[in-house]
Image (cartoon, grey):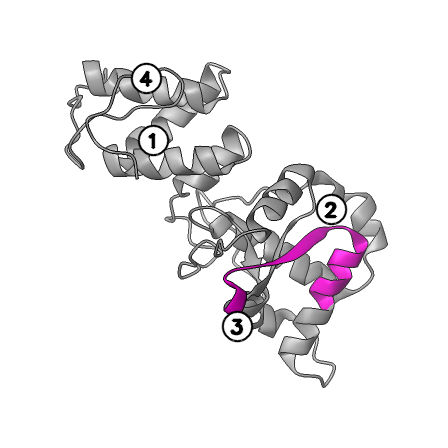
Amino acid sequence: MPSSGFPPRVRYTPVPNPLFGPLLEQIDDLAELKCTLRVIWLLNQKRGYPRVVTLGELQADRTLGKALPDDGTPVGERIERAVGMAVQRGTLATGTMGRQEKREQVYVLNSEPHRKMLESVTQGDASPSPSRTAPSPEDSRERPNVFALYEDNIGMLNPMIAEELREAEQLYPTAWLEDAIREAVTQNKRSWRYVARILERWEREGRSDGESGRYPKQAGHYSTPYGGRPTSAPRR
């Protein structure tokens, strides 16, 4: 049955350009290609830090299971083999993380920032970022979470920035965070320091749209490690 096409205001998932060039020429296994694309999409649906995809998540993914060619082997084995091929090709990087008694195989894109993040989280007891119920890729009503918005527009997350974003989520409306990031992009000031200063200014002076400068999600003021105001609320 033919597709009805893409809905208005459809959301997009960023994909590294080489996947549409040299890698597309090299990948001759359909299962590997589909698993690679699904990992990229799942990473963009994640909340929090670190954003990784576990092998268990992939093996439980109904969309991926239905999408892979059936060669007579269990779907979990097909998925593990396909992502293993992507790791061997260098498209994905892998490691294990979690507490010693419950280590999990995890996957990220094989880029330098992602490899550094993976190295830092696999050396301790960090757990993968919590999964959320994955929306349909066709659902254009889904709003990007602040972590994805930051990485798509400002840069890679690190543990310190992720903690600042989590704190900011408790102190400001989601719309403020999204608009502050967009304003930083418009001004070509792609840094968390600049985003935080926008939020501080809006809290202190109010916004030009008339919205109050105070947002009582949590008592106290928001501060950053870049010289912001002192905070009366203890850091978590």
The residue where tag 3 is placed is 60
Q: Amino acid at mark 1?
A: Leu
Residue located beneath label 2 in the image: 19
> Marks 2 and 1, Cα distance to the nearest angstrom?
31 Å
Q: Is residue 61 left or right of residue 76?
A: left
Residue at x 75%, y 41% (from the top left corner): 18
Helix, strand or loop status at disc 4: loop
Residue 177: assigned label: 1
**In the image, is residue 81 above or below residue 228?**
below
* First of labels 3, 2 by sequence position: 2
Expressed as whole percent of the image width and height from the top left, the position of residue 64 reads: 59, 68
Please report the bounds of the magenta region as a residue range: 82-101
Q: Position of residue 143 (x, y in %)?
A: 38, 44
Q: Earlier in the sequence, mark 4 or mark 3?
A: 3
Q: Identify the residue at image location x=80%, y=48%.
A: 23
Quarter of the picture holding the N terminus: bottom right
3D distance between C-alphas at marks 3 and 2: 25 Å
For the residues marked 4 and 1, what is the alpha-carbon distance in whole angstroms? 17 Å
